[in-house]
């Protein structure tokens, strides 16, 4: 990678146009995330945090540092910075109603093993909301069920693994379910997901822009919400193709309310509700 020159200055506030374009290309190549024009201030502020943490002088030095980072640790740190992690418990609640319907119908068919995937799990509210929904239906049965929770951000995955949240973050959960599934910790105002709930999650880092993924499937439901808006059409279509491979026929695929499937990507799916699809075929 050839790093373009920038003046050495103590004012690191805004990355220049050439370095911005170079950083945008690097981020896209590594993660599929598209940084739009007009985001220089946002990107600059986030990179400046790493520049200070590494005691570097400017953006040019930071790019050189990444170029020489054989371990890949700083690349991971950078992707953590640019990943947007907005999430909440039971966000878009109709998706969890559809998940409950799917679990209920699948159990009635005598199926005793179910697998689910939270593809962009962030700090955990989505997979824990899935787990609560499923446990309410299968908790008293012998059904073997698990949730795979993946994200590109190692920082968010650490929080998901810990499963600790301020009580204010749990306000969208009814009091009885909150008391059942989240226990007070020694830290005032913070609760932790129960061991039972945490043990239902398998947590792993995954870059959604680089299929094929290591999972074999089949999955009964995939939640891949509010992440495709950061991808271009080519990355979206590759991702949806891989989701289709992993989902069983009749499986549920939920995306974000601001997202939609293109004609090419929607092949093999039928829309069953707002931002919700069912895998067709056999």
Image (tube, rainbow, N blue to C red):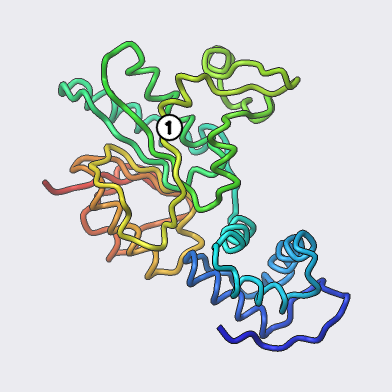
Residue 17 at x, y = what percent?
69, 83
Side of 52 relative to 128 (left or right)? right
Query: Split into 4 quadrants, where in the image is the N terminus?
Result: bottom right
Estimate the x, y position of residue 196 in percent, counting from the top left: 45, 19
Q: Nearer the viewer, residue 135 or 63?
A: 63
Left or right of residue 204: residue 191: right
Residue at (64%, 85%) from the top-left corner? Answer: 3
Q: Examine the rendered structure and indicate whether residue 26 appears above or below residue 101.
A: below
Q: Residue at x 37, y 40 (%)?
A: 117
Q: Dot 1 lies on which element? A: strand
Q: Residue furthest right?
A: 10
Q: With respect to residue 135, does 163 lie above or below? A: below
Image quadrant where residue 27 sits = bottom right
Q: Quadrant of residue 148?
A: top left
Horizontal relation, residue 182 to residue 130: left or right? right
The foreground one among 84 and 63 is 63
Depicted 200 relative to depicted 261: above or below:
above
Q: Quadrant of residue 263 in the image?
A: bottom left
Residue located beneath label 1 in the image: 201
Q: How packed is label 1: few (under 14 Cα within 10 Å), some, or many (20 or more)?
A: many
Q: Is residue 193 left or right of residue 109?
A: right
**What's the residue at 48%, 30% (across, down)?**
129
Looking at this view, is 178 or 194 the one in front?
Answer: 194
Farthest front residue? Answer: 70
| Relative image position of residue 116 (x, y in whole percent) | 34, 36
Vertical side of 244 occupied by 249: above or below: above
């Amino acid at each position: 990678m050839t790093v373009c020159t920038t003046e050495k200055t103590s004012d690191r506030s805004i990355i220049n146009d050439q370095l911005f374009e170079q950083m945008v290309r690097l981020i896209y190549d590594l993660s599929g995330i598209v940084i739009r024009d007009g985001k220089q201030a946002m990107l600059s502020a986030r990179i400046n945090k790493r520049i200070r943490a590494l005691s570097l002088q400017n953006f040019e030095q930071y790019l050189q540092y990444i170029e020489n980072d054989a371990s890949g640790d700083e690349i991971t740190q950078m992707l953590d910075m640019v990943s947007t992690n907005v999430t909440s418990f039971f966000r878009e609640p109709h998706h969890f109603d559809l998940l409950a319907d799917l679990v209920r119908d699948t159990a009635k068919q005598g199926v005793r093993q179910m697998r689910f995937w939270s593809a962009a799990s962030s700090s955990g509210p989505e997979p824990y909301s899935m787990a609560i929904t499923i446990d309410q239906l299968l908790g008293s049965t012998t059904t073997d069920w698990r949730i795979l929770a993946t994200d590109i951000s190692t920082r968010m995955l650490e929080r998901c693994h810990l499963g600790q949240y301020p009580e204010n973050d749990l306000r969208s959960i009814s009091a009885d379910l909150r008391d059942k599934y989240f226990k007070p910790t020694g830290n005032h105002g913070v609760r932790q997901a129960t061991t039972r709930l945490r043990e239902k999650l398998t947590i792993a880092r995954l870059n959604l822009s680089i299929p094929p993924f290591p999972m074999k499937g089949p999955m009964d439901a995939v939640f891949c919400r509010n992440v495709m808006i950061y991808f271009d059409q080519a990355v979206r279509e590759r991702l949806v193709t891989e989701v289709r491979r992993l989902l069983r026929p009749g499986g549920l695929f939920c995306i974000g309310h601001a997202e939609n499937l293109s004609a090419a990507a929607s092949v093999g799916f039928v829309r069953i509700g707002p931002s919700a699809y069912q895998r067709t075929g056999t």
